[in-house]
Image (tube, rainbow, N blue to C red):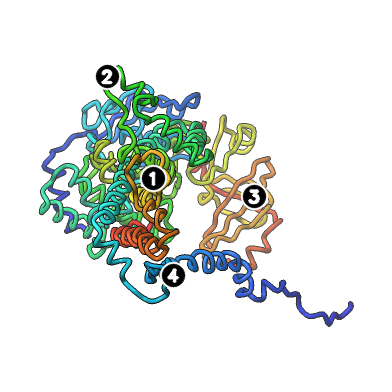
Amino acid sequence: MATTTASPPKGGFGYRHPRARLAALLAAPMAWLVVVYLGSLAALFLTAFWTVDGFTGALVRTFTLENFVDVFTTPAYLQTMLRTLGIAISVTLLCLLIGVPVAFFMARVARPRWQPLLVALILTPLWASYLVKVYAWRAMLSPEQGVLAWFLAPLGLDSPGFGELSIIVTLTYLWLPYMILPVYAGFTRVPNSMLDASADLGAKGWRTFRSVIVPIIFPTMVAGSIFTFSLSLGDYITAQIVGGKVIMLGNVVQQNYVTNLPFAAAFATIPVIIVLLYLAAVRRTGALDNL
Amino acid sequence: MLAPFSGVLRTVSERGHVSTAIRLTNLRKEFGDVVAVDSVDLDVADGEFLTLLGPSGSGKTTVLRMIAGFEQPTSGTIELAGVDVTQVPPYSRDVNTVFQDYALFPHMDVLSNVEYGLKVKKVSKAERRQRAEEALAAVRLEDYGARKPSQLSGGQRQRVALARALVNRPRVLLLDEPLGALDLKLREQMQVELKELQRAVGITFVFVTHDQEEALTMSDRIAVFDAGRIAQIGTPVEIYEHPKTPFVAGFVGVSNLLEAGVAASLLGREGLWSVRPEKIRVLLGTASPEGSERAAAGVIREVVYVGMSTRFIVDLDAGATLIAVQQNSHATSSELGAMRGQRVTLMWNTEHEIPVG
């Protein structure tokens, strides 16, 4: 029998150095997050406290709250801010109103073999270009010649035309899949026994929906609303195409970023803060604990 | 543990005595082409602990779900306390269910879970609170009302599910393999507690399990299910000592079947026979029977040590294989191991020979 002096078998470098393995895994995403995302956000915040020389248009890199004072004291800006907030809330509520029943149907009513097809149908519009969809809505909503006007003409009605309502309709269409998909996933995770138990304890369908299903899927509704709300808050192209004279927060940023970058930055900070406040409010409900 | 549940005791007696809690008549359930339940007739007496026992897919859970109202029978009728409820939805039936996965509402704390049924029925807040606390006390969870189900152990969740059902004071409590997810020790403890609770509250229990030992320990009567039908119904002693079919003999306990040919040569009897393993004595070498005893010679094929007892698998010269179980009162494991391959004589009293068809 031969005696062996070889060292005991060892795993590879990564096996022996778990921290190095973790670093290798996260190097690229961390670089992206820190440099691109946090970097640009920091630049945004920093710029918001600078100003421009009114005469030369050159950037003045001294700390000032002037931009924020402007934002909150100019009635037109305040109005735009509130309007944008109103649009984002309306879009979110409409998405809930339309999306939750659709998700419920997909997860609980439709036959299981149809479910993948329905999910694919919900996803399909996401593959089409954003601009194509918004221009399609422009054609739909166009007063007097639009598809909607054509349909409503026999009733003596006209399309709402280009304005706030059209923005809400178009954004609801655009972001609806982002509401349906998480809520659908939530519905599929509610075990049947939970519904049986509620019926067993005396609750009829509506009571079960209200007291058992909705609270259980509430976190997914919140998840969906984070998408619809923040996407609506930041949008400006839809307003340009179907908004007529109505402008949103993003339009103000777009109009100013060439001539007055610090003011645009200050204005762009507003939706970031609103979304942070929204997340904080949602966190208090405990909805994020189960995500 | 019984005192706090006096409220439930009272209502049951107030209701007066109704002899039949549940009557199933010619019950049948098809799922597509599959017949899950076929011609089931069953009467459950008020206050009885009845177990539906069978392997998975035998239809026992489907019967339970039809009694609860979660499934509609294809044909046949379901009566609760003499009233036909076949077409009545679950929320209007005077039964409550303890689910296999407990089905506790994850977003409610324990007290709200227990109060849910009363809240739905618009019981006043004060009474609701009091009854829920009573029910939690009855399952020894009085201090857990503020917890979420996710903060409880499996055994505690099981008890909450029990309290949530019992707080409604149903005429019948349905239990769908409620102990299946618990570990052995806890399961044995809960078996005793459930039985005590059932005696205390006097509610009819219909209990579904695939565990024959559980069924034998807890039940007043057992209905053994085989392929959608009731193969036999009777007390635990009847089911164990006098199985009527080879399936029942095999599913409840160890079967030890003596096929027709072997039975004829060994017992001198017609048909299929069975002898329970604990009734058989294992004697080394040859021995002759006395009185009403029967002897059968064979060779030990395998010796299985199971702690408290030892299981001998013996190939009989007559052709069958019998299992005999002996208590390990004296023998040591090494002595037992040495018995493999030895010639033995198996002895049993002829009164323990059971005809199974």
The type of residue carrying mark 1 is Val
First reached walking from the N terminus: tag 4 or tag 2 = 4
Determine the chain carrying the residue at label 4. Answer: A
Determine the chain carrying the residue at label 1. Answer: A
Provide the secondary structure element on which disc 4 rests.
strand
Q: Is residue B255 left or right of residue A103?
A: right
Q: CA distance from mark 4 to mark 1?
A: 56 Å
Q: Which mark is residue A190?
A: 1
Determine the chain carrying the residue at label 2. Answer: A
Please state which of residues B44 and B281 is positioned toward the viewer in this rendering: B44
Q: Is residue A279 left or right of residue B314?
A: left
Provide the secondary structure element on which disc 2 rests.
helix
Q: Which mark is residue A59?
A: 4
Q: Residue A49: tell me if it is visible.
A: yes
Determine the chain carrying the residue at label 3. Answer: B
Q: Which of the two marks, 1 or 2, is nearer to us in this view?
A: 2
Q: Which mark is residue A155?
A: 2
First reached walking from the N terminus: tag 4 or tag 1 = 4
B77 versus B267 height, above or below = above
Q: CA distance from mark 1 to mark 2?
A: 43 Å
Q: CA distance from mark 4 to mark 3?
A: 98 Å
Q: Quadrant of the N terminus of chain A?
A: bottom right
Determine contact: label 4, label 1, CB under 8 Å: no
Provide the secondary structure element on which disc 1 rests.
loop
Q: Which mark is residue A52?
A: none
Q: Are marks 4 and 3 on the same chain?
A: no
Q: Are marks 4 and 1 on the same chain?
A: yes
The type of residue carrying mark 3 is Val
Q: Badge 3 is on which residue?
A: B314
- Residue A11 at x, y percent in the picture: 71, 72
